[in-house]
Image: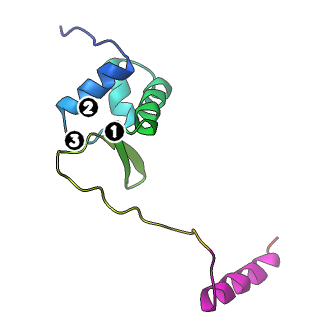
Amino acid sequence: MPRAMKFTRKSVLVYLQERTGQRFTPTQIANNFKRSNAEAREVLDDLHANELIRSGVDGTTRVFYVAAPGSQPRPERIVGRGELKGWEAGLRRFEALCMTVRR
């Protein structure tokens, strides 16, 4: 029976580095280390905040990984940010006007 690995930031980082390019959900990490999803998510978020690992969204699931050497990060898809001007602003105002009846 394999011995359970210690659950530390360093051990999670080593686990991900050994599997460079492979993507993991917090649930997969939690199951591997036999910990709760909340604990795994906390460690992964901390590693991501310190820019030791990368994250992305696969469908509706957030995944974490260590990028392969020499790989370029994908451009971030910007949705719903910034100030709308002109025609787009008019559409947004019209949408807001239509929704006032529903409130």
Question: Element type at marker 2?
Answer: helix
Q: Quadrant of residue 14?
A: top left
Question: Crowding near pointer 1: few (<14 within 10 Å), some, many (20+)?
Answer: some
Q: Are marks 2 and 3 in contact (CB under 8 Å)?
A: no
Which residue is the site of mark 3?
22
Residue 27 screen position, x and y as percent: 38, 32
**For the residue marked with disc 2, what is the amino acid?**
Leu
Picture disc at residue 53: 1
Which residue is the site of mark 2?
16
Distance between the Cα atoms at labels 2 and 1?
8 Å
Distance between the Cα atoms at labels 3 and 1?
12 Å
The residue at 29%/55% (across/down) is 73
Q: In this view, does 89 lie to the left or right of 9?
A: right
In the rendered view, how is the structure colored? rainbow
Residue 83 screen position, x and y as percent: 63, 76
Q: Can residue 62 be seen in this view?
A: yes
Mark 2 / mark 1, whichever is N-terminal: 2
Q: Is residue 97 left or right of residue 28?
A: right
Q: Do the residues labelled 2 and 1 touch (CB within 8 Å)?
A: yes
Looking at the rendered image, the disc whose residue lies closer to the viewer, 3 or 1, is: 1
Distance between the Cα atoms at labels 2 and 3?
8 Å
Q: Quadrant of residue 82?
A: bottom right
**Split into 4 quadrants, where in the image is the C terminus?**
bottom right
Residue 72 screen position, x and y as percent: 24, 56
Magenta stretch, main secondary structure class: helix
Which residues fall within the magenta stretch?
83-101
